[in-house]
Image (spheres, grey):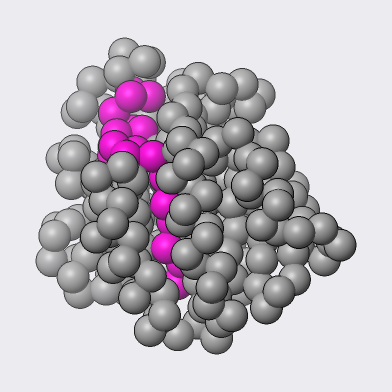
Amino acid sequence: MKILISDVDGTLVHDNQNISQDNIDWMKELQKQGHKIALCTGRQLFEMKWILNEIPFPYDYLILNNGAQILDRNHRVLYEKKMDAHTGRAILDYVTQFNDLYSFYSDGAVSYGFSHGQCVEHMTNLEEPVDVSFQELYQNAPHFDIISFHQDNQEMTITEACYEYIQKHYGDKLSVYYNLHYVDIVARGCSKGNGMTWLCQHLGINEQDIYAIGDSYNDLSMLQAIRQGYTFKHAHEDIKSMIPRHVHYVHEVIQDMLGGKNNELAR
């Protein structure tokens, strides 16, 4: 049995929500032949549900929060590691000082965002404003699955300064990742690579049967951990220089996994 570990944003789903039907068809064929698929993302479960409600991606497992949580296809928790409440509150105290940052957190049960003094519910893709105190909500959170922030204008100046501050003051307690325009913060030691390794050991899948694809810096821990790591021909040159296998589409990786036997789908 082989397994495909695929990033989501920028890999299966792009900014305009365009998807490749060929990718979906080949993913179904991969499962049909008895292999497994894990979607691996910095997103938390609420956000992944937004995507899965719109796009019928075949999958067997979800590796969420940059490896901090792993679920089966029925969303039962197989593994999770949480950020302690004290550290998470300190991070949110710091980043909410900046009006141009959109910040959010999830504790696994609820998720809320904050920008320009307004709290929004982050549990549906509507992100509706709610008349509650964001500070009071996170101060009462028992722990944190993930904290994330980005600039509303898609620039990175404040984002990068906050990233450096958090790395300097909390780098011994947290793992901090760039993910497109976002910074994602999870418990120390969590990464997509460690999540992939845990899941494959749990399933008894050998390293030579693991294939992974991604497009960003937070994917490197999984792409560099195995021999069959892929990125895209359009990826940043830094990523391409570290990952030698380059493709245009996810389904090209699946064709490699299946040894080019499914010529009918390729037509």
Q: Which residues are magenta?
A: 181-200
Residue at 66% across, 73% down: 115
Q: Is residue 110 left or right of residue 99?
A: right
Name the residue nearer the viewer: 27 or 165: 165
Could you tell me which residue is drawn at 54 percent across and 73 percent down? 97
As drawn, is 126 to the left or to the right of 217?
right
Residue 191 is one of the magenta-drawn residues: yes
Taking the spot 17% from the left edge, 57% from the top edge, the residue there is 243
Total marks in image:
0
Instruction: Decide which of 266, 65 is in the foreground and name it.
Output: 65
Hey, which residue is sitting farthest right in the picture? 131
Q: Is residue 90 left or right of 120 when viewed as pictured?
A: left
Does any portion of residue 198 appear in the rendered image?
yes
Q: In the image, residue 132 lies at what x, y percent?
A: 82, 58
Is 70 positioned to the left or the right of 261 in the image?
A: right
Reply yes or no: does residue 231 show up in magenta: no
- Above/below status of 29 relative to 255: above
| Rendered view: 183 above or below 100 | above
Q: Residue at x 47, y 64 (%)?
A: 94
Residue 112: give x, y in percent of width and height: 69, 54
Quarter of the figure that contains the N terminus: top left
Residue 263 in view (yes/no):
no
- List x then y, in percent, for residue 169: 28, 57
What x and y, as percent, mark residue 186?
A: 42, 45
Q: Measured along the vertical axis of the image, is residue 176 above or below residue 2?
A: below
